[in-house]
Amino acid sequence: MSSTLIRRLLLGLLAIGLLGAGIWWAKRPKPISVVLTEISQGRVESSIANTRAGTVEACMRTKLSATMGGRIEVLAVKEGDKVKKGQLLMKLWNDDQQAQSTLALTQVETARKRATEACTVAANAEREAERQTALFKQGFVSGSRDEQARADAQARQAGCDAAKADVSQTLAKVSATRVEQNRTVLYAPFAGTVAKIVGEVGEYSTPSPPGVPTPPAIDLIDDTCLYVRAPMDEVDAPKITAGQTVRISFDALPKQSFPGKVKRVAPYVSAIEKQARTVDIEATLDTDKSPPHLLVGYSADVEVVLAVRENVVRVPTSALQEGGRVLIAGADGTLQERKVKAGLANWEFTEVLEGLVAGDKVVTSLEREGVKAGAAFVSDDKAKN
């Protein structure tokens, strides 16, 4: 075989090899771009949060209405006013009751004078009876005269007692008229702020009859003491106890949270929504770190911290697959599956008890197509470069 033929044969084989290599290169599996996160040590905590928005409540709040209807004569406060305990808030027209009270006081004075008169006569009759008894014992008067004097003294004493009873009766009537007058006035039961007033001077104020809710005349709140009421899922309720640490956030104060404590856990389940039964908890803010100018009625969220681990190996929770498996970056450029033993967990991080060490890199982009054990990969950072 000539050298020319051999050379041509070698060139043909080389061309076929290059063509095959080109086809393999074009059809080879392309590395998958993945997001890698390096395992480190840090804080992991377990917590639960409310199912629906909570509400800022006042420790003391009362909705006041007079116990009887009437025309508003005096409004001693305005909405937003700060009031002291016992301060007059509102008064209904009660001139008729004041007249009854004046009449009752006059009757008391009259009854007292009649009692004085009757008791004076009774005292004189008693002295006369004693004198007749002494004379009877000396034989100067008959026994019938003595008995008549004694009977007259007893009758006069009964009249004195009846007059005193009339005084007590008229005093009770005065008390009754004062009670009636008190039904037409409203006083602050505690120091606070007037949140709302329903009615104006001259308008008729009506109390709420049984079964017919009507707006209260005055809504009074003590905004110096506030707490947050929040509904928690009934499944989480057994994990919550008074004194646990919480983080409280408010829609009105975005991107901020404030520390506090669980104050109370309701002793019953609320079934406002039958498919989502909840248990209300009450949480108070730490006084030295509470936000200023909180308003009653603000919406709030409460996150109850159940447990905390410091300086532990942790993995992003998004990197965990079913069965406690993760994909790590292998030194050979492929993804490798590894089984881990998980500890405390939340939506962000999970504590790793076994299976990973600080410095390992895990895949957190599990939702991407083709991400599986054995697949060639390239980090997003390298892919961008």
Image (cartoon, grey):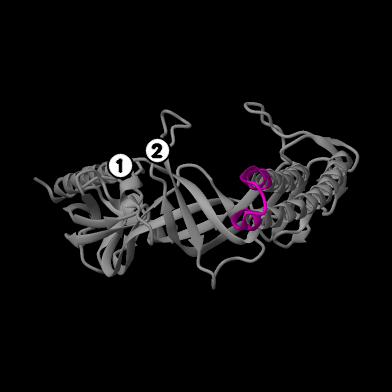
Which element is circle 2 on? loop
The amino acid beneath tag 2 is Val
Mark toward the viewer: 1 or 2: 2
- Few, some or many residues within 10 Å of mark 1 (<14, 14–19, 20+): some
Q: Nearer the viewer, residue 155 or 273?
A: 155
Q: Earlier in the sequence, mark 1 or mark 2?
A: 2
Location of residue 334 in the rendering, given as x and y in whole percent from the top left corner: 23, 53
- Callout 2: 10 Å neighbours few (<14), some, many (20+)? some
Near-viewer residue (357 or 109): 109
Magenta-colored span: 134-149
| Quadrant in which the N terminus appears | top left
Residue ID for mark 1:
370
User: Which residue is located at x 26 percent, y 60 percent?
Assistant: 351
Image label count:
2
Residue 286 coordinates in the image, percent (x, y): 50, 67
Query: Is the residue 292 above or below the residue 164 in the image?
Result: below
Q: Residue furthest top?
A: 211
**Circle 2 residue:** 269
Q: Could you tell whether 232 is left or right of 366 in the image?
A: right
Residue 309 versus residue 232 in the image, above or below: below
Q: What secondary structure predominates along the stretch shown in magenta?
A: helix
Give the camera-side residue of 74 and 365: 74
Determine whether, in the image, residue 248 is placed left or right of residue 254.
Answer: left
Q: Quadrant of residue 277?
A: top left
Please give the name of the residue rendered at 14% of the width and 51% of the height, measured from the top-left corner: 3
For badge 1, the amino acid type reads Gly
The residue most toward the left is 1
Q: Secondary structure at mark 1?
A: loop
Q: Residue at x 17, y 48 (%)?
A: 10
